Image (cartoon, helix red, strand yellow):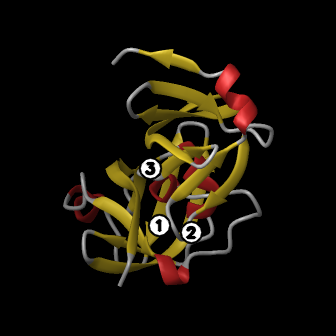
Amino acid sequence: MDKIVIGKVIKPQGIKGEIKVDILPQDKALASKLKEIYLNDKCYKVISVKNLVNGMFFKLDGVDDRNQVELLRGMQVAFEREKMPKLEQGRYLVSDIIGMEVIVCDCVVGTVADILQYGAADVYVVKGDKNFMFPCLKTVLAKVDVENKKLYLNKEILEQIAVYED
């Protein structure tokens, strides 16, 4: 069973068993559609999800008070890939992008090591012979091959990338 980690339990919210979960911003829309989640290896049915400015809050079946949530604090929140809601065209999970080979003009130039989030577009951090970053834009990406873990950049990007020292 392939599980994808999307966050971790931060703390109880109120006294009726809601949990506050720290989830990456790009995974919030996906998390709000999940019908069940795993905390470590135990499966819980999701009763409700609130996506508020100050956090994401889950109510889980069988977790009915603050004391039960305290026992879950720090646990990873995951879901089964097979039960994942369909993503919109051009949307990917961070866990699928991290570790992808980055290819320009049929040459592997590095691996996606991190994804930074800056308002208008995510910025992919690539580690290789020369470290560089690029914005995740349609004009920059030629193709994303999740199945083969390869990310192809348009060759015009070579003139625009900012190389940095680690």
Q: Is residue 73 left or right of residue 78?
A: left
- From the image, tell me which residue sits under label 3: 98
- From the image, tell me which residue sits under label 2: 48
Q: Nearer the viewer, residue 38 or 14?
A: 38
Q: Is residue 2 left or right of residue 51?
A: left
Q: Which amino acid, mark 2?
A: Ser
Q: Nearer the viewer, residue 120 or 7?
A: 120
Secondary structure under badge 2? strand
Q: Residue furthest right?
A: 139
Q: Please state which of the two labelled residues, at mark 3 or mark 2, is closer to the viewer.
A: 3
Residue plotted at (33% across, 18% down): 166
Q: Residues within 10 Å of mark 3 (few under 14, many from 20)?
A: some
Q: Is residue 10 left or right of residue 55?
A: left
Residue 165 versus residue 8 in the image, above or below: above
Estimate the x, y position of residue 76 in percent, counting from the top left: 30, 59
Q: Which amino acid, mark 3?
A: Ile
